Amino acid sequence: MEEKKGEYVEGLARGLKVLECFDKVHAVLTLSEVSRRADLNPAAARRSLNTLERLGYVRRIDRKFVLSARVLTLGSVYLRSANSEELLLPELRRLVGLFGESASVATLDRQEVLYIASYSEQRAKRMMATAGTTFPAYATSLGKVMLSSMGAEELDNYYNKVNLQKLTDKTLNSPEDISEQVALVRELGYATSVDELDYGITSLAVPVKNSAHQTVAAINCSAYSGRVTAESLIEERLEELRVAASRVERVLASHPALMHSLYLPQ
């Protein structure tokens, strides 16, 4: 969408970029690290950090910075207004009750899948997702479903922006290989992922669509790779997963705030 002159607040954008610098790996950052990760000059990074500190979203420890607990209020506003977890968790609990392990609903946010609801038995010692978690789209079954909704131009734009890292020896990290798999997902109507995001995770995902039949989210179930295969997930869980997707679609149709907060294909 073309930006109107004067309608874009650069200072706000910088502040949000600074907040997004922090993650599990980068929980404590120096000014120079914030400057580099946010792609801001040091003076702009310093002003943003000072403003966020005054507002209570950042704390200073000596010459390093950490997020304060107040940042949680930003995410909780979405959870309260869209009511995402309360609306989606019943169906995820049903899936976990049937098959165990975990089930999630996610949408696409730039180059990553963003989890908006997740439910798990938390038995396995492996990477777990909660609402707000992001993972590289190309390495997850949820992400492959979302990528399959893209046209050629949008997919090319995705490849131009994403950093295709080899997360495991099973991760596909070339545009040619990913495009081939995405085309297959588009044809089959489901996606699988085996040890591509992390070792020990096998998952199956299907699309969640709006009334215009556009994919706005995806729903998956996952299990420990030592107990299942992609083929067994397809045989045993695909039908119920599609039932769950249909029920989630009805929930979204009756809750516009949640529906309109999700990814919309271009």
Image (tube, grey):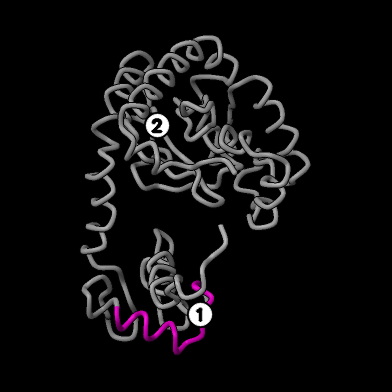
Per the rendering, the mark at residue 51 is none
Q: Is residue 119 left or right of residue 242?
A: left
Q: What quarter of the picture does the C terminus occupy?
A: top right
| The quadrant where residue 253 appears | top left
Q: Name the residue under label 1.
A: 40
Q: Mark 2 points at which residue?
A: 104
Q: Which residue lies furthest to the right in this view?
A: 176
- Residue drawn at x 26%, y 62% is 71
- Where is residue 55 shown, x and y percent of the image? 22, 75
Please state which of residues 127 and 145 is positioned toward the viewer in this rendering: 145
- Residue 179 vertical position relative to residue 9 in the rendered view, above or below: above
Which residue type carries mark 1? Leu
Q: Earlier in the sequence, mark 1 or mark 2?
A: 1
Main secondary structure found in the magenta portion? helix
Q: In this view, does 186 lie to the left or right of 83?
A: right
Cα distance in 3D space between marks 1 and 2: 35 Å
Under circle 1, the secondary element is loop
- Where is residue 48 shown, x and y percent of the image? 37, 80
In this rendering, the label closer to the viewer, 1 or 2 = 1
- Residue drawn at x 55%, y 10% is 235
- Residue drawn at x 50%, y 32% is 201
Magenta span of residues: 37-51
- Where is residue 106 shown, x and y percent of the image? 44, 37
- Residue drawn at x 28%, y 41% is 82
Q: Decide: marks 1, 2 in contact (CB < 8 A)? A: no
Under circle 2, the secondary element is strand
The number of discs equals 2
Q: What quarter of the picture does the N terminus occupy?
A: bottom right
- Where is residue 147 shown, x and y percent of the image? 61, 38
Residue 215 visible in this rendered orientation of the protein:
yes
- Residue 114 vertical position relative to residue 180 in the rendered view, above or below: below
Q: In this view, does 222 lie to the left or right of 148?
A: left
